[in-house]
Image (cartoon, rainbow, N blue to C red):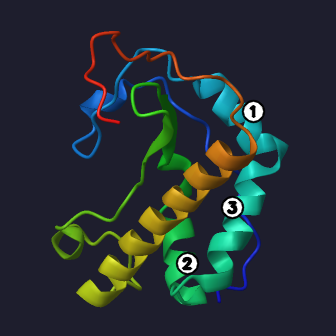
Amino acid sequence: MLDVPAPEPPTLRQVDPNEYDDAEVGGDDYHRDDLERFLHEGAWEEAFEQWAATADLSVDEWAIAEDLDLVSRFDFFWDSFADRVGYHAPGIPEDWKERGIHPDLTSWGQVSGINAGLTELGQVVCDVLKDEYVDWESEYEAPDDLPDFS
């Protein structure tokens, strides 16, 4: 359990999510304004509390993530093709040691733990948004000529 207060939710950027290495998104209406509003209306705090209850990060590791302002670099977007909330989680780069990213970072274990924790947080936020806040229908409609496998 990570016993820290929830940080402020991120401000979502107007970036094409297909530019991320870890995302392939359908559609072009990412609903970022809606998602950002939901984050500020309580989705972020609810998700953070859920995540923190089982997080494997130490308070010191979380302090490093906060010092590096990683939370502000989260991105959330609607993927209409997959009918889901997608996300891009920030992380500490592979060359953290050479760049002297943070004086308290001393091991790959810390780096991978922080990166994994942020990825898990992003997924919890997506789940809370989709399950409790998103109320629009996906714009994707299957073609009429799909085979019937029943």
Question: On the picture, is 39 further left or further right than 32?
Answer: right
Which residue is the site of mark 2? 62
State how far apart marks 1 and 3 are (Cα): 14 Å
Question: On the picture, is 89 further left or further right than 132?
Answer: left
Which residue is the site of mark 3? 47
104 lies above or below 138: below
Which residue is the site of mark 1? 37
Q: Nearer the viewer, mark 1 or mark 2?
A: 1
Q: Position of residue 89 (x, y in %)?
A: 42, 54
Judged from the image, the secondary structure of the residue bearing numbered disc 1 is helix
Q: Position of residue 112 (x, y in %)?
A: 31, 78
- Front residue of this view, candidates 105 and 138: 138
Amino acid type of the residue tagged 1 in the rendering: Arg
Judged from the image, the secondary structure of the residue bearing numbered disc 3 is helix
Judged from the image, the secondary structure of the residue bearing numbered disc 2 is helix
- Front residue of this view, candidates 129 and 97: 129
Q: Earlier in the sequence, mark 1 or mark 3?
A: 1
- Front residue of this view, candidates 119 and 140: 140
Q: Is residue 13 visible?
A: yes
Amino acid type of the residue tagged 2 in the rendering: Trp
Question: On the picture, is 69 further left or further right than 26?
Answer: right
Extreme residue toward the right, this view: 41
Question: On the picture, is 8 further left or further right than 66?
Answer: right
